[in-house]
Image (tube, rainbow, N blue to C red):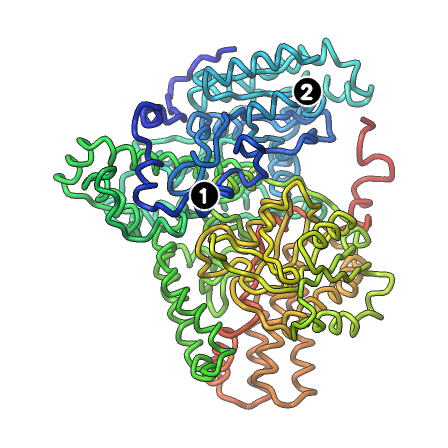
Amino acid sequence: MGVACGPRSRHYAPGALEDSRRSDEVTSERILNGVWPNLRSRSANIISLSRVSDNGGRPIVLEPNVRNPDPLKITYIIAQGEDRLDDMSPFQGFGRSWGSTLWALRLLAVAPASILERSWPLDGLIAQRMGGANSLAWLPLMVSALEQLALDELGFVTVVLSGSDAIAKRVDAWCAAQPRPVLHVRHGEIADEDAAIAFCDIALREHISAVLEAHGAELSEPRRAAAMVGLEQWMRRERVPLAVSFGYHNLSTPNEMVFERADRLIETEERFVGSSEEEYDEFVVESVQAVLDLRDEIGFRDFNRLYLPRPGLILTEPAFYRPAYARTRGDREITTKPMLDTLRRLQQQKGLWNTIESAQITALMEDPKAGMLLGARQEELAIQTYGVGLMAAQTCSAVMRLRPAVNHVFPTLSRYARNIRAVGEPRGQVARLKTPRLFDDLQRELAAAVGAARIELIMGYRGAIKIVADAPIELLPIGDLPLAMRHDTSRINATPGNLMMGELVGRMSATLSPAELCKVLVISGFAENDRLRNLMARALETIAPDLVGRVEHVFIRARSRGELVAALNASEATILIFDGHGVAGGNDGIGGIIVGKEQVNVWELRGEARIPPIVILSACDTQGLDAPNHATVGNGFIAAGAVTVLATMLPVGGVDGAVFIARLLYRLAVFLPAFMSARLRSVDWCEVVAGMLRMVLASETTDGIVADPAASAEIKRRANMDINSGDPDWYAKLLTNVQEVTALEEGVVRRKARAIMARSEAIRYIQLGSPEAITIDDGGIAGQFFPPGSARLPA
């Protein structure tokens, strides 16, 4: 098929970068192997799309059962090449095929998610999207994996997008063998936004019409009738002009994609080029505010009590593999001075506004290796930009690009982390006195790296926040609280890049009843002689009477990797709690968990063990602030199949960790039924955990200042009420109540509370993946919108 280009040509595929991938040249990967000789050897088995490797060393991208249960959804497949584990992009770990399929991500930003979508009123549709409904069913899939699938495993209507002639030929052969027509779109056929919109208006509709005409009888009569109405009413929407304009730039590209999917017309002027860091800050904030204004304009509907708002603000910053920030002299036989100069500029970049001397530009342009290195990084930035943009476009969320400076806080992070670990040593009392100062240093550095303009916008924002970055933005100070204590937050890590892209695909919302959610498997990995071995069991015993009939939990002791795998495969639990020791990074740099006396690499569990959708790690440093690289336990469980992981950024106390788990299960047993009984709205897993962590901080603060047990209990009761009701001022009210009871001066209370926060267990946890995709409803909310039997058409 072919679609003519529109008058405004905005090319999405970085074709100029393709020359850098020629096999007869020295690749940037080979150059960087000379710079960081241990980088690939230590982590080659986890730089892929984070799936188990087959015998050829290629990552298996997807499990075979990928079909969407709704046949009126359109399935989009981005067919990719056989990207080997040792041929990922040098700084961030993307498969090489992404560079030739960036245009496909821009196309998907305007593509309809279903046959029915173009017949629906736009504002209501966007409100549904803001609640996570009607999201795209799209997947990056190796062409070899595609060849192993039958069309019925994908969907009734399937569109495949390919990025090279070699892959296109294999896709054509696969399409020819399928029982229904497949629409195949090749690289170069859609070059800009206008062409993408024309494709959806004409070519896609015609394809769906042909499939329905020839194969409509395969659908149930109600679905076929609904599909025919959808085609008849398929609208070519007139795009609404925006009051603001954008100067086409990577910083605003994700928000442009949001507006494109919302059928807004962007009047793009000449490309934005700022003359100061402040101008770049202003440009970023303006584009974010424009999307937030659109969300306010659309507003939420009554059905958003069921389709809960997804995070409306995404904070993102690309990153390098951790070892790639290390200064190096390089291998003189492979590297050149301009190449190393370029590398160091990339490593040291802290702002979005950068200057370079004319002599350096000349040297860079004349040195092919320097140009290759810069081109490789530019391509990585484009991949993350478009990936985040497509995720944001599906939920009409604003994307705020941060500054590279956030990736330079790790030395300060490391000092803070070492201090926390030292508290348990003989010198712990001295270390404990230093903790508040080191925490203050860390927060000041984060605040300076993010910038006042962005923080001011975040201060005024109300709603959940998604982080797509490696830096611990959760600790960014927003008023008196770290970001994760003020807002419900979850994150997708920027490295490895392929794991990030797999997570950016997004998760379809899964609504569970409390009974389905509250199936818990607790696995203890402690050895028989470990002093922490019985803490969790005792903590669970204390709340056992409250769990009866509400939380179904099984406690198992695993003494080896084999017993761990067996316990996982024998369970149908929704929640896995691992109680044991974590390892930030062994000799190979890969984080692990200790089971008995064995160190287990959880990255290798993919395909071998059933991983529940929710994983809670009651173990130290499972997503360590100062982990040696991206190969953490938390990332590993995400790669192995978890939807969300509650991981730890620092060591957690044995007693404190056990009490936290007991309190969380008690929250499931008591809070969820009470919340559901109000019949006001459903609740998502992200806010369940975020509320629990706030209550932990409230308890720690109160217990650390208030001596009177009765007064302390009353203050904590009030704080829990404020937190569970969603009061944004809960912390200020907590400090006021503490001050009134203790009669201490306000400044004294704040200083004491600040010191407690710096040492708090609550700020050591981090939510990975997509906890917001798991919604809890006992049927009371859904029943208000869907009478029994009418929620779904028969398949």
Q: Is residue 177 above or below residue 407?
A: above
Can residue 604 be seen at all in this image of the molecule?
A: yes
Q: Is residue 14 above or below residue 420?
A: above
Residue position for label 1: 290
How far across and down, in percent of the image, does residue 418 sit? Answer: 44, 70
**Quarter placement of the C terminus:** top right
Q: Which residue occupies the foreground of this view, 142 or 251?
A: 142
Q: CA distance from mark 2 to mark 1?
A: 41 Å
How far across and down, in percent of the image, does residue 794 sit? Answer: 83, 28
What numbered label is drawn on residue 63? Answer: none
Count of marks placed on residues? 2
Q: Is residue 494 above or below residue 444?
A: above
* Residue at x 51% of width, y 35% of height: 390
Q: Secondary structure at mark 2?
A: helix
Q: Secondary structure at mark 1?
A: helix
Q: Is residue 721 above or below residue 105?
A: below
Q: Is residue 345 left or right of residue 190?
A: left
How far across and down, in percent of the image, does residue 360 sit? Answer: 16, 40
Give the image quarter of residue 706: bottom right
Q: Which residue occupies the foreground of this view, 136 or 234?
A: 136
Residue position for label 2: 151
* Contact (Cβ within 8 Å) of mark 2 with mark 1: no
* Residue at x 44% of width, y 73% of height: 419
Q: Mark 2 or mark 1, which has the lower sequence index? A: 2
Q: Amino acid at mark 1?
A: Ala
Q: Residues within 10 Å of mark 1 (few under 14, many from 20)?
A: some
Q: Nearer the viewer, mark 2 or mark 1?
A: 2
Q: Amino acid at mark 2?
A: Leu
How far across and down, in percent of the image, does residue 278 sit? Answer: 29, 52
Q: Residues within 10 Å of mark 2 (few under 14, many from 20)?
A: many
Can residue 202 be seen at all in this image of the molecule?
A: no
